[in-house]
Image (spheres, rainbow, N blue to C red):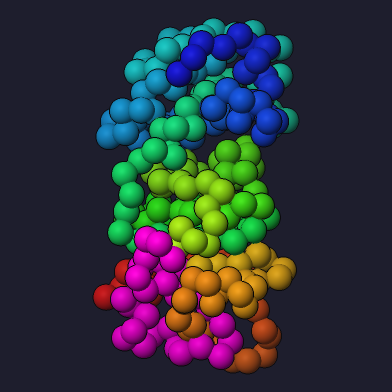
Amino acid sequence: MQRMKVDDVKKLHQKKYRDEFACFLAEGEHLVLELEKAAVNNTALQASELYVTEHYADRDTRFHKHLVSERVMQQLSDTRSPQGIVARVPISALTQLPRLPRAIYLYEVQDPGNLGAILRTLGWFGGFECLLSPGCVDPFNSKVVRASMGAIFYVPLVLDAGIERVHARFTQPACLSLGGKSLDCAAFHHADCLIFGNEARGLPERLIQEANAATYSIPGSGQIDSLNLAATVNMCVYELMRR
């Protein structure tokens, strides 16, 4: 990972500069701890660098460390009360991981909290990669990174993935539909890619057809017609891993 001036590191709060410099920021002690744990097995993460205030000056770490003033930390931070520790992480360490046999495909998901929670679920269970369609929220947005609670360091990511990626790689894709078979049926447990749509608009019918996806539903009382996206992913992944 290329060395950067602190003035350039500050710019990483903006997506265009994250794209330009191919790295993102992870702020706070918990995220840095998760990053250090993940770097044990993912050697590409070992190129990460830390920016710390005097409070963390003596911290023992495998990463290259830069001591900065409280004023500079305020500029590097995306929170009101900075903890005094921020990591700069190479994006390629998460987008060039080995492919996994199962995946989640997210179509135009917009809410950073939802994406962060989904990554947290995938990190918990393991064995899934996350494919993001064009138009999805940037997974390296600070709100996504925080909501993932560090799970982002463990989940392989595929960015700007068209639905043709699903058709080309997976033989038994599945999605949710109110008219689909029950999620607890035997066929669902053979699914190798779960497809989920935008929080408000769901999945376009053409997308389901292009992916040749089987449709399933989560049984409920029928009193309301939708579930939160992250909760839906949680239930589907749990059911898939249960057997």
201 above or below 130? Answer: below
Q: Nearer the viewer, residue 235 or 190?
A: 190
Image quadrant of residue 12?
top right
Determine the residue positioned at 48% across, 83% down.
216
Q: Can residue 28 be seen in this view?
A: no
Compared across the picture, whether 51 is left or right of 60 comes to right
Q: How far across and how far down the image is residue 15, in percent?
A: 67, 34
Residue range corresponding to the magenta coloring:
167-194
**165 or 58: which is nearer to us?**
165
Residue in front for this viewpoint, 68 or 167? 167
Q: What residue is shown at x 37% (from left), y 61% (from top)?
A: 169
Whether 3 is among the magenta residues is no
Q: Residue at x 61, y 67 (%)?
A: 197
* Image position, residue 43 (x, y; %): 31, 28
Residue 185 appears in the figure = yes
x, y percent for residue 50: 49, 18
Taking 57 as reference, is 117 above or below it? Answer: below
